[in-house]
Image: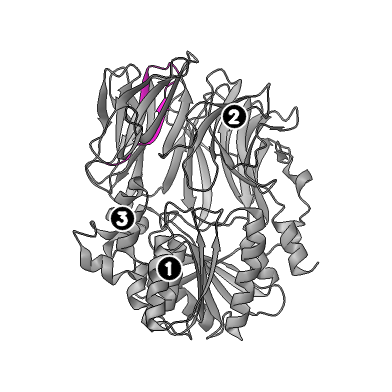
């Protein structure tokens, strides 16, 4: 199979995201992209008794699961029509697939968070950076209860500043959990609002700069929360009845990334990162007793207990994310029908190798190495975004296409990445963006050259968002022997411009990472902006941008193109009018991936 036919096959593999289990645990809904012109929502019974139901089939924009209705008979979904992240809420009933009932107004001029129906079936709860009275967009988020019959919108919470992260209504419909970050850009505190707008108060605060996340138990009276505690995270339970806190897991040796309670009850699922992989444990909330789910190859996250076992999310580099039923003594069985939809032979895919090296200060850094199929054309470093994220042993069509085109690929987990402990994640803030995390990447390239995998002068860097910023950093700061070419995708170029042009709710993240605002630490923002070093570019440059991007906006491209022109630095520019933060639509990926491969091939000579 030639490379272009292989790309068609790779891009035909549906990408699963956002699985949400129904309140009684009998159904699961998820979003699949790449099955059509846009992402759509599907649902299936967890017992595998029938085929998945396609709930949406819209060519107008990507649709994602927001929540289940309390009765489990319908799903609330969001739809972003043009990639600008301004989504509208709809309800889709299991009995009427394809019929999207609008719940919020068309053409929103705000960013929406959450979206849940009250048990009375009449009220809708969500957050938005919107003044409901004037209809104007606001800097800060507000928590709202909307009456679907009268249209009345009641404000339940109005933080002085900052953002509200995904509000969650309890099962009884009496209270709403949400987080605020007014005290420090690095912190998150948990608040509780009552559904009538009579009470709004802080319930969990472990320090101004400590992040706390929380979710309800199915009983609607207890809250499971995860809080930062120095170099690690603690897992606890807060009670609405007596407002007491009990600790379920308080161990500095455990690297807890996530925890939740299945909606139909059962043990608490604790997800940890261990050895660059995913490990899940099950905790009895009453006794604290710990057990483990079945040990299977790849990454496994249990989602909901079922008779005789669990339904969970499973994946690795050769097996795309799928939802499988796990029963003792039986092979995992897909409940989505993904294997029947795939024309891809997993044996054709390159495995992810655990590759490690020492950075400039001796810190061990991990990455995933994919070796070229056949003779190597060169090496591409694919830097993940975030930076509060990490590269996993996970199917990636771009990686596999590069491998098929003859490139080695390294996906580095530089300091600041999740998955390696809270101390490692927080260490990026010691320098701020453009610090030693970039040296981690450079040291990884040097380690590949020393190992005989990569060849000096034949290495390129690409990535989206913070990965795009890292590509800009590499091409503006490193010799061509280290990086000969860069292809930043939706990457920040001028951190001051980016701060003021991005979504209001994202600015505190820049402040957290950089140690303040552009007005507070102007020298750091200026020094860490690649735009101020474009005159030092000696390698090849391809700039890629989604023109609807509200996160790293096209202003980043506008200002850097002018700077490149002033310095006489040549570049190529590839823009996509129908894309937002990242290039995602299948027809655009069919353009982007070959263009990137051709670009690096040409740059390497």
Q: Residue furthest right?
A: 1
Disc 1 packing (10 Å; few <14; some 14–19; many ≥20): many
Q: Report, in whole angstroms, how far the alpha carbon at label 1 lies from the one at label 2.
A: 41 Å
Q: In the rendered structure, which segment of residues is drawn in magenta?
A: 162-176
Q: Residue at x 57, y 82 (%)?
A: 603
Secondary structure category for the residue under label 2: strand
Disc 2 packing (10 Å; few <14; some 14–19; many ≥20): many
Give the image quarter of residue 492: bottom left
Secondary structure category for the residue under label 3: helix
Q: How many marks?
A: 3
User: Can you identify the residue that label 2 sits on?
Assistant: 305
User: Can you identify the residue that label 1 sits on?
Assistant: 470
Q: Please tell me which of labels 3 and 2 falls first in the chain.
A: 2
x and y, in percent, of residue 258 in the image: 44, 42
Q: Please tell me which of labels 1 and 2 falls first in the chain.
A: 2
Secondary structure category for the residue under label 1: helix
Q: Residue furthest left?
A: 520
Whether residue 604 can be seen here: yes
Residue 75, numbered circle? none
**Of the pair 579 and 441, the residue shown nearer to us:** 579
x and y, in percent, of residue 549 in the image: 46, 54
Which quadrant of the figure contains the C terminus? bottom right
Residue 500, numbered circle? 3
x and y, in percent, of residue 495 in the image: 32, 63
Q: Please tell me which of labels 3 and 1 falls first in the chain.
A: 1
- The image shows residue 455, relative to residue 306, as above or below, that is below
Q: Is residue 51 magenta?
A: no
Q: Report, in whole angstroms, how far the alpha carbon at label 3 lies from the one at label 1.
A: 20 Å
Which quadrant of the figure contains the N terminus? bottom right
Q: Tell whether 569 sits left or right of 361.
A: right
């Amino acid at each position: 199979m030639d490379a272009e036919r292989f790309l068609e096959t790779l891009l035909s593999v549906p990408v699963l995201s956002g699985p949400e289990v129904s309140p009684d645990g009998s159904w699961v809904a998820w979003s699949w992209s790449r099955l059509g012109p846009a992402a759509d929502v599907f649902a299936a019974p967890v017992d595998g008794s029938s085929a998945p139901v396609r709930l949406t089939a819209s060519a107008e924009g990507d649709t994602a699961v927001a929540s289940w209705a309390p009765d489990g008979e319908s799903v609330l979904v969001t739809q972003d029509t043009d990639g600008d992240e301004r989504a509208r809420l709809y309800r889709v009933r299991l009995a009427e697939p394809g019929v999207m009932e609008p719940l919020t107004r068309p053409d929103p001029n705000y960013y929406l968070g959450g979206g849940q129906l009250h048990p009375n079936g009449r009220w809708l709860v969500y957050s938005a950076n919107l003044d409901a009275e004037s209809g104007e967009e606001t800097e800060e988020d507000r928590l709202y209860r909307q009456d679907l019959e009268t249209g009345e919108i009641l404000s339940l919470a109005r933080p002085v500043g900052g953002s509200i992260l995904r509000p969650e209504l309890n099962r009884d419909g009496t209270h709403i959990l949400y987080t605020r970050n007014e005290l420090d850009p690095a912190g998150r505190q948990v608040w509780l609002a009552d559904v009538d707008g009579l009470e709004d108060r802080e319930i969990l605060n472990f320090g101004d700069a400590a992040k706390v996340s929380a979710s309800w138990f199915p009983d609607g009276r207890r809250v499971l929360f995860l809080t930062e505690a120095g170099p690690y995270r603690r897992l606890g339970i807060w009670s609405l009845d007596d407002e007491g806190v009990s600790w379920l897991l308080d161990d500095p040796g455990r690297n807890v990334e996530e925890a939740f309670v299945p909606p139909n009850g059962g043990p608490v699922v604790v997800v940890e990162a261990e050895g660059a992989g995913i490990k899940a444990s099950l905790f009895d909330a009453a006794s604290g007793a710990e057990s483990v789910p079945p040990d299977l190859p790849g990454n496994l996250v249990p989602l909901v207990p079922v008779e005789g076992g669990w339904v969970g999310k499973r994946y690795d580099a050769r097996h795309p994310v799928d939802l499988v039923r796990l029963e003792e003594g039986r092979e995992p069985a897909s409940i989505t029908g993904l294997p029947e939809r795939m024309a891809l032979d997993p044996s054709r895919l390159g495995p992810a190798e655990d590759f490690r090296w020492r950075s400039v200060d001796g810190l061990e850094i991990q990455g995933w190495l994919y070796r070229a199929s056949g003779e190597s054309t060169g090496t591409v470093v694919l830097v993940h975004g975030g930076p509060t994220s990490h590269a996993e042993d996970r199917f990636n069509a771009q990686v596999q296409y590069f491998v098929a085109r003859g490139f080695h690929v390294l996906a580095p987990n530089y300091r600041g990445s999740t998955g390696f402990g809270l101390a490692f994640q927080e260490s990026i803030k010691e320098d701020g963006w453009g610090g030693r995390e970039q040296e981690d990447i450079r040291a990884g390239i040097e380690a590949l050259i020393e190992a005989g995998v990569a060849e000096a002068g034949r290495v390129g860097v690409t990535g989206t968002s913070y990965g795009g910023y890292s590509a800009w950093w590499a091409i503006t700061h490193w010799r061509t022997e280290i990086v000969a070419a860069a292809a930043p995708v939706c990457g920040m170029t001028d951190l001051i411009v980016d701060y003021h042009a991005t979504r209001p709710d994202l600015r505190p993240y820049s402040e957290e990472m950089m140690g303040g605002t552009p007005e507070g630490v102007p020298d750091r923002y200026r020094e860490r902006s690649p735009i101020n070093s474009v005159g030092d570019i000696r390698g090849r440059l391809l700039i890629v941008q989604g023109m609807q991007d509200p996160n790293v906006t096209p202003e980043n491209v506008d200002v850097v193109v002018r700077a490149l022109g002033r310095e006489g630095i040549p570049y190529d520019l590839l823009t996509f009018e129908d894309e937002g933060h990242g290039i995602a639509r299948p027809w655009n990926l069919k353009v982007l991936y070959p263009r990137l491969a051709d670009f690096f091939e040409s740059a390497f000579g």
